[in-house]
Image (tube, helix red, strand yellow):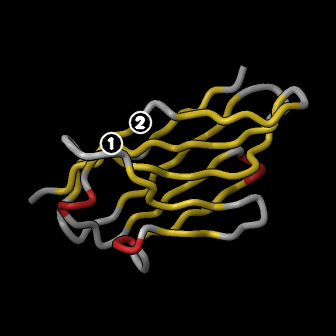
Amino acid sequence: QVQLVESGGGLVQPGGSLRLSCTASGSSVRIDAADWYRQAPGKRRELVAGITSGGITNYLESVKGRFTISGDNAKNTVYLQMNSLKPEDAGVYYCNEDVWGGGRLSSYWGQGTQVTVSS
C-alpha cells in the first residue's frame, strides 16, 4: 500500500520561503512523475508545478522564477521550494505522484498541507 505524506506548510510573511515535501512510503516503491497542486478557498485546484521521470519541469506562469520542484529518488521524496511568497500563493497544497509499486504504476494524492502567506 503506497501512501504519500506531505509536510512543510505553515504561516509565512510575504516575501518569505517554505519548502514542501511529499514522501512516498511503501515496499519497493519508486516515484515516476510528480505534480504539486494548490487550492485556495472558493477556487478550483490548479497545477502549480510538475516534474517528469526524466527531470523535465513545468510551472504555472505566476510562480516561474520563484518556485522550484525537485526530487530525491533515494528518499522517494519530491520537494517544492517556494521563495518570494505572495498572499495569492496561499492555499492547500497537494502532491500527486505516479508511483511504481508491486509492478504497477498508479497515481496517488497527498493529504494536503496548508500554506498561509500573511503579515
At numbered mark 2, what does the secondary structure look like: helix, strand or loop? loop
The answer to which quarter of the image holds residue 87 is bottom left
Residue 12 vs 29, above or below: the answer is below
Residue sitting at the far right:
103
| Residue 81: percent from left, percent from top | 46, 63
**SS at circle 1:** strand
Name the residue: 69% across, 26% down.
2
- The spot of residue 68 in percent (x, y) is 51, 68
Q: Where residue 11 sits: x, y (%)? A: 23, 49
Mark closer to the chain start, 2 or 1:
1
Q: Is residue 60 visible?
A: yes
Give the Cα distance between marks 2 and 1.
6 Å
Q: Residue at x 87, y 26 (%)?
A: 102
Q: Residues within 10 Å of mark 1 (few under 14, many from 20)?
A: some
Amino acid at pointer 2: Gly
Q: Nearest the camera: 18 or 93?
A: 93
Q: Nearer the viewer, residue 83 or 108?
A: 108
Residue identified by numbered label 1: 92
Q: Which residue is mark 2?
A: 112
Packing grade of label 2 (10 A; few <14, some 14-19, many >=20) is: many
1 sits to left or right of 7:
right
Asked if the residue at tag 1 contacts the one at tag 2, i.e. Cβ–Cβ closer than 8 Å, the answer is yes
Identified by mark 1, the residue type is Val
